[in-house]
Amino acid sequence: MLLYKDSDLIQLSIEGDTRAFEELVGKYQHKVYSLSFRYMGNEDDANDMSQEAMIKAYRSLKSFKGDSSFSTWLYRITANVCLDELRKRKRTLHMISLDEPVATLDGDDLEREIADSSPTADIMYERKVLEEQLQGVILTLKPEHRSVVVLRDVMDLTYEDMADILQCSVGTIKSRLSRAREILRKKLSDRELLP
Amino acid sequence: MKCQVARELLSPYIDYELTENEKVMLEEHLSVCAHCNKELAELRSMVDCLHQLGELQAPTGFMTELHSRLLEVKVVPFESKKTAAAQKPRWIAASVAGIAMALGVYISSVMPITPVLDKIAGIFDSQPAPNQGTSIEDIINDIQKKNQGNQHTPAPKDQPIKTADVTPVTPQPTTDPTPSNTSEIHSTTPKNNTVPKNNTTPEAPIVVSDTKKIDTVNVQMTVANNVLAADKIAQIAMVNQGQTESQLTDVMSGKSQVVVIWVPRDKVDEVVAGIKQIGTITNPMQGKQDITTQYNEAKDQLQVVANEIAKIKSQSVISPDDQDRLSALEYQKSFYQGQITELDKKADMVEVRILLSEEINP
């Protein structure tokens, strides 16, 4: 099965072979999960959104025309699932403002004073703190800004792929990314998180 | 060029997405504007940081969960006559599997809990291979007979498994009545690893038993297809409140060779009965994995961290630096508590390790 190309696996999936579909999406499970995590900010939601995206992909595989790569198509579904969920939460839960910093960001330089405990826990703590701080600031961005930053700067996708995923022009991607990076840079700079 | 215009071009500039004209104009501006240069440096630095976030790993069992969800939704996305015909046997197989699972759940709900490995020994020993016509009902009947033959008093939850370290499974009942120390840890260790609030408040000491072991069952299985077998084993584990710990794949063939699952003690019989449906089981072995050192080290570290937290909290004034250190210590405390919880959880379950090999067709 490992030797099959995406196009072969897609064809087999369309013929009803769920193993082929699992093989197909299995190749992208980590990227889909990463993308979901960057949108949602926690493991449980990331898992739920990734599963939901893959089920949606399975249901709508027939509509995949091959105009873009399968991975791009799958990321588009994932991004839409996450954005839908974020919109839903914004409508129903008025208590959370996406433009407010998350609570974990309040304590700066937490890693400064770590000492004399086991190295494993120390290293994990430092890494966790840094990642949490960055991830925390990403989560303060509006969803449309979060999308472009995550797709470009975390997942390293091209402007064309991003335009395909977010269903807009490359020009829009360019200006939106510029704006999003500017906002993010200021937030990181304010928190002294930039070297 | 004005700074405002230049700033809008910095982002596409670092991505090499500017036209030649835009690039020349921006670089001219940058050669004379220290402020925009500083912003460019910060932007590059930020993008480098974001790149370092990297790719996360989907959780273990992600694909197994997806597989189950795909079966649950019973989606037939493409309804051509050809595929509809091809799906029919799968649907029947899924229904049979569903009925079998439901029966398994029902039987488990009415059966008394008996020492687990006695049952396993009986199942392995008395059941013919599935290829010889064993039905699910036969296996369930056999388990029921075994239960009737065994003592009717339900075993306590933490009933130790009475075996020597790694011995071949035999049909004789075990004779060693001595409980292992596995149960001690549950009865003596507080569930919540409470941290002393201050040095003056005496807390119950964390009692660590001499040994802590995980019960294991190792089997070899001959199956028609390793990949399909591994998949079915994962499903069986899941419907029995277990989980797939790992699935080792042979690089050359791309096929699963060893599947390790964790299942609750009282579900081992159902799991084994289910696994027997997939292929022929040989060389069943039972044993114990010693995790005492790992467990004790986590307990010791937790105690050290808890003492440190208590020491800081007992101070009349807590400085900002102390507050930072408390945050770090609290993280470490939850880290070690997590480790201990995980090991406790594992000690309540049985590890079943299945070595798969495919039938050789002449």
Image (spheres, coloured by chain):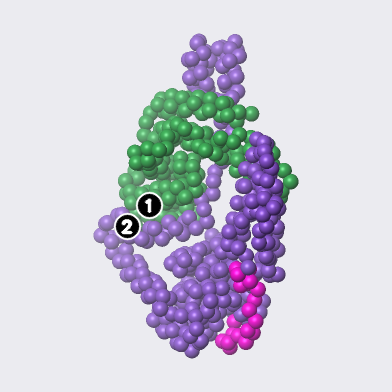
Label 1: chain? A
Q: Residue furthest right?
A: A116
In space, the residues marked 2 and 1 are separated at their CA atoms by: 9 Å
Residue occupying the point 63% across, 68% down = B188
- Say the numbered circle drawn on residue A55: 1
Q: Amino acid at mark 2?
A: Val
Residue occupying the point 52% across, 53% down = B59
Q: Main secondary structure of the magenta part?
A: loop
Image: magenta residue range: B169-187
Q: Color of chain B here?
A: purple
Q: Position of residue B160 (x, y in %)?
A: 59, 76
Pointers 2 and 1 in contact (CB under 8 A)?
yes
Q: Which residue is mark 2?
A: B75
Judge by depth and name the residue closer to the eye, A163 or A41. A41
Q: Color of chain A here?
A: green
Residue A89 visible somewhere in the drawing: yes
Residue occupying the point 70% across, 47% down = B311
Residue A157 visible somewhere in the drawing: no
Judge by depth and name the residue closer to the eye, B215 or B124. B215
Q: Secondary structure at mark 2?
A: loop
Q: Position of residue A183 (x, y in %)?
A: 49, 26
Q: Position of residue B354 (x, y in %)?
A: 55, 70
Q: Can you say whether A123 is above or below B95 in the image? A: above
For the image, the number of numbered tags is 2
